[in-house]
Every structure is written in structure tokens, then in C-alpha cells.
Image: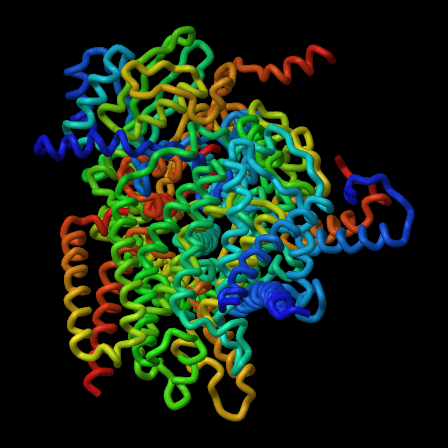
Amino acid sequence: MDLIHAPFVPGVIQTTVDQVINWSRKSSLWYMLYGIACCSIEMMATGASRYDFDRFGLIYRGSPRQSDLMLVTGNVNLKMAKVLKQLYDQMAEPKWVIAVGSCAVSGGPFRGSYNMVDGVDQVVPVDVYLPGCPPRPEALLDAVLKLQRKIMRPQRQGVAS
Amino acid sequence: MSKPLLELLIAGIKFALVLGFVSVNALFLIWLERKVSARIQNRMGPIYVGRPQGWLQTAADALKLLTKEDIIPAGADRLTFVVAPAVLFTSAVLLFVVIPFGPGLIVRDLKLGVAYAAAVSGLAVISLVMAGWGSNNKYSLVGALRSASQMISYEVSLILAMLSVVILAGSLSTVEIVEAQSRIWFIALQPLGFLIYFIALLAELNRAPFDLPEAESELVAGYNTEYSGMRWAIFFLAEYANLFAGSALAVTLFLGGWQGPWLPPVVWFFLKTFLVIVVAMWLRWTLPRVRPDQLTSLGWKLLLPAALVNLGVTGFLVLAG
Amino acid sequence: MNLEAFLTEVKSRFPGASFEQAGQDWVLRVPAAEWEAVAGYLAGHGPRFDYLSSLTAVDRGDRLELVLHLRALAAGERLTVKTDLNREQPEVASVTGIWKTANWHEREVYDLFGVVFRGHPKLRRILLAEDFEGHPLRKDYVDPRRRKVEGQA
Amino acid sequence: MTTAEKTATQSEEVLEQVLTVNFGPQHPSTHGVLRVVARIRGEYLQDAEPDLGYLHRCFEKIAEGWTYPQIVPLTDRLDYLAAITNEWAYVLAVEKLLGLQVPERAEYIRVIVGELQRILSHLLWMGAYALDLGATTPFLYVFQERERLYDLMQLVTGARMTYNYLRIGGVKRDLPPEFFPLLEKALDNVLKVADEYQALVLENVIFQARTKGIGVLPPDLARQYAISGPMLRGSGVAWDLRRSEPYSVYDRFDFAVPTGQNGDCYDRAVCRVEEIRQSARIIRQAVAGLPAGEVRAKVPAAIRPPAGEVYTAIESPRGELGVYLVSDGGPQPYRLKWRAPSFVNLQVLPEIARGAKVADFIAILGSIDIILGEVDR
Amino acid sequence: MSEYLEVGLFLVASALFYAVTMFMASLVSPHAPTAAKQSPYECGEQPVGEAQVRFGPNYYIIALIFVLFDVEAIFLFPWAAALREVGMAGFIEMLVFIGVLLVGLVYAWRKKVLSWI
């Protein structure tokens, strides 16, 4: 039985099992170490002592195979878009994406120039959009909490993909 | 019930106990590692998943990994790729057979206990090489080659350090070795031997400063780069089981095993083992990583001669005095 | 020897060259044909301009202007060298043999302006993808994606 | 080479294949999105070729379409670890074109925040370099210090990383009075951290074994490649634009230019740590000598520099940051060329990494201190 | 039954445990393979060339030295356990044995085999 892709069956056991699995997923969002630009420095700051991602169970992994969360921390250009897509494809299901910073959300100040992808949602499905240039660590934590809420209630809020 | 069947049943129960212990212990150790590293780094570590101290963090991680997709790369050598984690896990579990947790608290007191432990722990390298080769990934391959050369550079020193303890105890049985330490722990007689054993152990366990096979800054995740989901979790589980078993053997050989005043023997055993583990963690989060060639030359040019000399001197002293 | 005297000497050696003072900086203009010879001379004589700060180009509309910013570390002098290139078929000798650092600078100019450097060891795009079309820092460059959007509008 | 040796090497080549490996663009140690195509044999690196452009953001083209003041915040995003120095290089170029005199107080404030920026940047480098060599904890230690300095910068500029603080003709606003006691405390802390780092990392046996004699860059080669900043100084060339071509008010301060002798990774590390101490010295002098007065010159709302061109260079944490600005008299620059020190310094990587071991290659790459935002622009 | 019953059982049972765990995981985990997902990971770029290549013979030389010393260690185990019985004569015999191997190690050392990797 494939619990994850099974159609939603109302039933106490199924729901409870789903809830437990979702809880484990939201509690252990391992993010891929993938810094692109300015925002990646703030991502590092969020992982460092003052903000400490690890409190929420977020640790970084070098390999996409073991990551659940991709933080797109910066602007993606045409050359990078292929890499981004490839990395996203190589992540194991289930996986989530947070577009961190204005550049990832929409292109930011570089929007519309010759080499840019205006927003990473043109390349990979995005679950949470986080504006800011760069967003503060508190904002990044907030985005993660929003994602956690989304993971807990996929039916109510709709899954991106 | 016939006798063989009964024996089989008892052995089965023992296995279930060991398995339960290995799993729970690994979850605890991973949690501990995250907490210890957090303390060293002025952080909190996990706190929100299972308040107040993040007790459920590793349980959540394990459950998540269980329900995560298992990717087998297209170019992979399927058989070696799939079997590799099992080899590492099995070698870790087999080590637990000869660990004396307390008087009488041992799966089986093998006559050749120490030799058995050395042989079984040597299996780990096969797993890493299988994983590295089977993954069809370059980082994995380099990581596997590194781990092979690393482990063989340290295995001999590790065994020689064990042997000087064997000379003192006059036995290969782990229980008898612990009993021989009732008067004085062997670390007092073998300070150099313990140092060699501990350094070689860190190298055998691929822990910093010797974590070359999975050097994050160089090889992304080393031999396990391509592993995901539960298959990867088994690697992780086995690694921490090995950490515990290796530390427990260090305690057995050098730190008097379960021996100690006032407290029950089992408590002493766990106290000492966790002390060794925490020291290993402390080192990991403090030191930079050495380079592969520095590691091999340290093993062959310093530890091996030192271990040989140590062995000879120990033998001479035992015979002379 | 001060810089002006040295530049006079350069001019006497390379008749096509001319120099002027713009602000605090001296600017030496040379024809494209003598580009490499002058560069080699500058690197080895007088104050010895051994340090190539930057090499770039400017699209002047009717021509491409190649600009070199040189330093002489020991003497503490600075010099700007310029040459004009044909905009349609910009081609000039590479100076990588004189200053190794010119390698990537020239690749960048090739990438963004389309200037071909003769004798460059590995003239390939450096910043943009290999399959990128056009040279975007030219003034008349239009993003094909933009062109499509404007065409539809 | 004897015949026997020759056959030995030949048969070795037959036996051992060369592996072509990508390091990056997503890799823990390429400090961003650099891709290095390496050819390795066993643990040895035969060749390494950097592949850039994964962060090329068309900065120079965008600048041609924006007005002069608009470009200031855009420069923040180039070398995002040293936003102030980027702004400084740019406004200096515009001011030179305009022939504008900047008030003294503004110059001093620029020195203070600029040197704070240098400390911030070097701190991150120190942490990241330890991380490259496999030590995680120093990274978190320096980030604690960075957070305190972030707070300080935030007090002055309102932002943590991308400040948009310098203006053409001065700075955005004066330093608040509560800044000074906090600064004093922060500098004490920074010096303490530098000493701690020296004791815990630079003097660590493993660290020294990993960096001494690794990635040696001889001074001649450094000049050939126009290397600048701590990398050049690590090779023993005492070239610092703050000293050699003093801009702003740097000629009024007393500070040393630390140099190394061997030009290896270790020397570069020592130079950077020493530079932190020197920056703290400069800041203290600047605070002591801070004159009163305006912080912004009178500048017309629409800035239209006369037609002409200028090349200005300042010493960024990574080296010579040059701005070549061409004006045609209009409200937007005709051409803005960014001479990024990382871009130039990175070029020497294949030269000094050839034949190194894979682990050393990471150490060498880390010691160059590149910021991809600036390399790719 | 021999004292190695547990060892044999542990061997089989832990392999079985792995199989069962992986089977359970396959029940509850999603499975959506695509060509891109299964391609080898190489920092997001397309890999160049094969990963499974022949690697240097020096690894094997180190492995050979290792085998020598490992065999030595096996000989040493019974010797160490029974040192008090074999006495000084046995001790000296073993010293000669170790000495011969040490000469080999010094030879390898001088030949720079050990400083290769």
C-alpha cells in the first residue's frame, strides 16, 4: 500500500498514520547545502549559533539524495537553471523548495536582464516564497515554520506539485 | 523442547535484545552528538521536536528516512549497492557478541573474543568499498579508496595495541580480560597502548580528524553520496553502533570494563563507554581534518613502530617481572 | 625618468602612437596593428609596467575601444593604453604572452563584446553559457526573449 | 630518467585512469557556485579548470540603464561580503568624474565602516577556511562575532549585509552617538577572537600540516597574474592600495601592511588575521580623529558627470577593486567596468593547484578567498 | 552446538533485519524514478566520463604490506595469549619474526611506498 500517493481515504487510522508521517517529515527537514548568492550568507547565519536551524531539526546535507528541502538562496541565471533543475530532480521524494530572497522569487533587481531567470518557479515548483534582499534569518525561520504548517495540512492548503 | 531448539530460541532473544539496544542506542547517540556539538558551538541543538530537549528529534529523523524515497542510480552496480549497508550493519551487530556489559551480561564469551572482534571490525572496510564502487559516483569512489587505505593503515596498529593487553591478561576472552583488571586497569600499565588504540579506533570509525572517506568539504558525502532514504539510514545506524562497540571495546581492554566501586557494574560500564564516546565527539567538533597521505604515514611510520615496540617491551616486562 | 619622457620615447619608437594626459592619468593610444608590440615594450622598458590591472572594452557606437590599465608596481606609475577596433570584425593580437592575467580578461571581452584575440590559448566564453547568442555588452544587443515579448505586444 | 623508470611511468598510466570530476557548482567548498573541472589520478590533481558564470547577473549591462545614484545599492550585491567597499569604489569613481570634494567627516565615517566591513569579511573567511579543512566549530565561533558586528552595522545603516550606506558626495547619515561605546566593545571582542583564532586554529598542528608549503605562489607569478590583496601580500609583496596609492584619508593613519614570506596558504591566513588587527587600529585612530561637520556634500538631484572617464581602485578585503567608469554626459553611465579582485585572483588557481592532492586543492581554493558574486558579476 | 551459534545466527538475522527494513520502507515510501533522478550526482552538472575506472597500483602495494602485517598479527594472537607458557625462548623467536617484518617495512618506507597516497 502506498500511503503517500494513495487517494485521500477518510479513516481514523489512515489519518493518524498520515499525521505521524507528516510530523516526522516536518520535524526533520534536512536542507541541501546549496548557496548561490547573498542570501546564502544569511542562510549560513541562520544555521549559526544565534539563530540555530538545528533547534527545529534542520541540518544540512551535502548530497541532494539525503536532502528534503532546497533553499534557493539567490538569483538563478540561464546557466544555473539547468543545474538547479538537475539538483532538484536528484532529490529523493518527498521534497520541498523555498525561494529565498527577491531574486529567487522574481528576479529582484536583476529582473529582465539578458541572462536571468525571473523567479525560480519557472524552473522548479516552489512551496514557500520568501521576499527580502536578503531576508533576515528570522524571516527565513518563519518561512520554514510556514512550510512545516503546509506539510502538516497538505489537503487544506494544496500541494504545489 | 529439544535442547538445540531452546538454544536457538535463547540466541534469538539475545539477538532481539541486541538489535533493540543497537537501534535505541544509535538514536540516542545521534541525539547526543547533536547536543554535544551544539554545546561546543554555543547553540541549543534540537529542542522543539520532543520538548524540552528535542528527545524525539532522531526518532522523527528515522521515521522520515523510512518514508523517504530510495534511489538506486541507473549506472550503479545494483548488487553491491544494495548489499553494502547490510555488510556494515552486520559487522557492527556482530561486534556486540563479545562485549561484556557486566558480569555474565554478554551474548557469548568467545574463547577467541579479541581476535574475533578484530576480525569482525575489519569487515567494515569491505562495505565502504562496495558502497563506493557500486554507486558509480566519483566522490564515492574516491571516498572508498580513501577508506580502504585508511583502514588498512590502522588495522595493524589497532590489533597490536590489543595484543599488548592480551599479553597482560594472558587470555583472548573479553570477560577474562576484564576480570584481570580487578586490581589495576590496563590503561595504567599500557598508557601508550591505549593512546595507539584510541587513535587507531578514531581512524577505523572514520571520525574526525580522520573522517576522510566522507570528507564533506572535499567529497560532498564520500562513499554514501548516492544513498538515500532507509538505505542511508542503515549506514548511519551502523556507524553509531560501531562507535559504541569500539568505545565499549576500549573500555573492556583498557579501562577495566565493568569494574568499579559502589555503583553496579553495568552502570560503570556505560559510564566509561559514554565517556569515551563523548571524548570522540569532542575531538570531532574541535579538530580540522588531516590529509590522506598524512593519515597513512602517521599509521605506518609512527603508530605501527610504536605499537610493535610497545608490544615487545610489554612481553619482555611480563616475562622478566 | 618620468612618465612623460618615457611616453615620448614610446611615440618615437612606434610612430602610430599618441598620448595625452586626462586628469591624473596618462593615456596612450596605439593602432591595433601595433598593439602587441607596444604592450611588450611597455612591460619590459622604462618604469616596467609589469602589472595589468584590467583589460576591457567600450562600445563607442562606431568602433570598439580596447582599454588597458597598467601599473608599474616598483615605480608606482599608472598608465592607460587604448586602441580602436573595427566594430564589424573586431580582431586584435592577444597579450597573454606578456601578462598572464590577460587570459581571462580577454575571454571576458570576447564573451561580452565579441572581440577575437589572435593567439589566445583558449578563446571561449567565460561568463555566459556556450550556447548563448550574441555579445550583450554591445550597445545594440537586444535580448531575444525581450524581442519576442515586444513583438507580441 | 632511466629506461626502467620510463617504462614504469608509462605502465602506470596504462594501469591508472584519470578521473574527470566536477567540483561545484553545488559543492560545500567552492564558496558559492564556482565549478572546477578537475582531472584527478588517485588522490592527485592533474589539472583544474575553473568554470565561471553560474552567477553572472549582467551587472555591467544593468548599470548602463540606471542612473548614477541608483547603482549604489546594486553594487552591494556584487561582493556581498564587502558591500561597503563596493559602494566606496563606485562613489569614488563618480566623485572623481564630478570633481566633487567629500566632507572630511564623511571620509572618516567611510574609513570606519569600510574597515569594519573588512573585519566582517575576513572573519567569515576565517570560519569558512576552517570549514574547508574540516573543522566546523570555528565557523560558528566567527559567526557569533559577525552577528555582533552586524548589529553594529545595522545601527548605522539599517541593514545586515547590503547596506546602501554610501552616497555620491558622502554617506547616508551620521553615526549615531550610541554607536561609539558599542564599537569600542566590539573591537575589543574582535581582537579577542583574532587571538583565539590564532591560538586555536593557526597554531593547531593539523592546520599547519595542512597549509604550510601548500599552494605556494611565488611573487613573480603573482605579479604576472596581477594578484592583489592578502594573496599578493602573503607572497611577500607589500602592496596595499591604502598605502601605495592612498585614497580617501588613509594617508593620515598609522597601520602596518602585513606580509608573508613563503606565499603558501598558511601565510595568506596569517596575513588576513593580522589585517583584522590592523583594521581595528585604523578604526580606533579614525574615531579619535573624527572631525565635526557635514556628512554629505551638496550634490544636485540629477547627477550628470561631464563626459570623460576614470579608473579608480581601492583596497577591498580581497584586493584591488577597480572601477572604470565612462560617462557621456548623460544621467546614466556609458560604461561601467568592474575590476573584481576575486576574478583576477581566481585565475591563478590552476597554476598553483596543479599536481596538488585533492585535499590540498580545497585548501588552496579556500585560501584565495573568492566571492562568486564578484567573480561573475 | 558450538559457541559460534550466536555468531552465525546474528549474521543471518541482521542480514534478514536489513531485508525486512528495506521491504517495509519500500511499502511506505514514494517511488518515482526518472532518468534525471537516477543519473549520477555530480554537483548538479552532467558527469564527464566513467566513475568506475582503474585506479593506481600503489593502493595494492599498500594492501600487500597490510596483508603481511595482518598475517603477522594472526600469528601473534596465540603467542600473546600464551606468552607465559612459551617463555623467553618463544619471546625471542617472535622478536626475530617481527624483526624480519620490520626490515620489510623499513624497505617499503625507504622505497617511498608509504608516502604515496
Residue farthest toward the bottom in the current orientation of the protein? B262
* Residue at 33% from the left image edge and 60% from the top image edge: B154
Compared across the picture, whether A108 is left or right of C106 comes to: right
**Image x and y of residue D267, in percent:** 27, 53
Viewer can see residue D90: no
How far across and down, in percent of the image, does residue E13 sit?
A: 59, 57
| Quarter assignment of residue B31 | bottom right
Residue furthest to the right in view is: A10
Image quadrant where one finds the C terminus of chain B: bottom left
Residue E80, above or below D336: below
Instruction: Out of D356 and E97, give the one closest to the viewer.
Output: E97
Residue closest to the eye, E49 or D67: E49
How many numbered tags mark residues here? 0
Name the residue furthest top.
C88
Which residue is pictured at 38% across the width and 39% down the height?
D341
Could you say where residue B272 lies in the image, as x and y percent from the top left? 48, 79
In the rendered structure, the answer to whether residue D49 lies left or right of residue C12 reads right
Q: Is residue A28 left or right of residue C114?
A: right
Residue displayed at 67% across by 61% down: B59
Res. A158 image quadrant: top right
Q: In this view, does D13 lie above or below A53?
A: above
Q: Residue at x 25, y 73 (%)?
A: B311
Q: Nearer the viewer, residue D205 or C46?
A: D205
Q: In this view, does C24 lie above or below B145?
A: above
The quarter in which the N terminus of chain B is drawn is bottom right
Does E13 appear above or below D229? below
Along the viewing direction, whichever of A68 and B312 lies nearer the viewer: B312
Q: Where is residue E26 in the image (x, y as percent from the top left)?
A: 69, 44
